[in-house]
Amino acid sequence: MLLFLFVGYQLWGTNLAEARDQRALEKQFSQFSAPAPPATGAPAAPPTTPAPPVLGDAAALIEIPKISVQKYVVEGVSTEDLKKGPGHYPDTPLPGRPGNAAIAGHRTTYGAPFGELDKLDPGDPIFVTTPEGKFRYDVDRTDIVDPSQSEVLDNTPDNRLTLTTCHPRFSAAQRMIVVAKLISPVLEPPPAPAAEPAPEETPPAQKAGLDAGLSGASTANGPAIAWGLLAAVIWGLTWWVSRWWRRWPTYIVGTGLFLVALYVFFENVSRLLPANV
């Protein structure tokens, strides 16, 4: 029964957490004011380049009409980031900017934003809105690669959008890559920053790859054990109290408390599992 409940949590319960996080991202994104797009074919450069989004905050809004996707994109592709919605790879430019903008997303859990990427055909439009405007991409191709082939995230001379998710469905054996080409509008590269004194050398940050957000979080060990024990204690107390008090009222109250503890337990267990997409 616990295994069936956990499967149900993975497929439907995680959607509740994702919907809550999407509402928070929507509020963040609504604070952005995007300038009006330029005339078709005319390059545009905003007076000032917006500061890059902070990890964990809203970065963009992605819309894929053919598969009814309208999701707010979070900055970052860690396990916690992808629970909120699609995640923008911080090492890549934001959509609309020159180069290869890349976004990852779950395929079967946490709202499954990229659950139907396999239904996209060449020419299907993808719209991405950032603080700099709304941009249209048209799907160019779909590839299936191994998780080690992180070169699909490398920068490119053209303006493209790369969407990544797991393949096949319910598995993380491979990655599905959807590549789309920027149609309009086209932004100029941001101006080079003024020269500043070189800071002290620090180890370079590790570049996120196709395995980002899929390896599990060992920090969930403690909370998973604690909430699992709490759920067991609640179940035991419910059984014990039902022997000395009215049975059905006890079961109703105890079951409600047990399910709450079990939900949090499952949430932490899912953080421990690899390839939770």
Image (cartoon, helix red, strand yellow):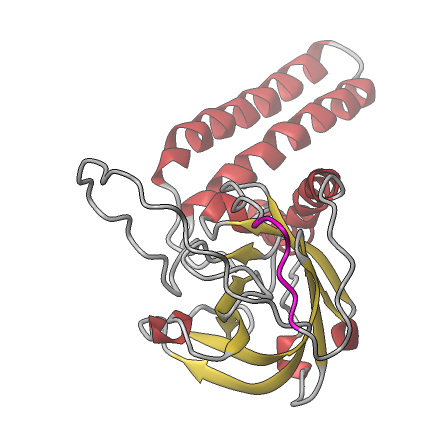
Q: Nearer the viewer, residue 156 or 26?
A: 156
Q: Is residue 29 above or below residue 96?
A: above
Which residue is located at x 54 percent, y 80 percent? 179
Residue in view at x 49 percent, y 37 percent: 268
Front residue of 72/6: it is 72
Furthest residue in direction top, as rendered: 244
Can residue 270 be seen? no
Is residue 176 placed above or below 247 in the rendered structure?
below
User: Which corner quadrant of the image does residue 21 belong to?
Assistant: top right
Part of the protein shown in magenta: 43-49
Residue occupying image coordinates x 30% and y 40%: 196
Where residue 265 appears, as percent x and y from the top left, is 53, 34
**Does the magenta run of residues contain 47?**
yes
At x 66%, y 56%, the residue is: 132
Question: How many discs appear?
Answer: 0
Residue 235: percent from the left, percent from the top? 60, 25
Residue 217: x %, y % from top left:
39, 43
Against 238, residue 98 (above or below) is below
**Position of residue 253 in the picture relative to residue 216 (left or right):** right
Q: Nearer the viewer, residue 68 or 33?
A: 33
Q: Is residue 183 above or below residue 17?
A: below
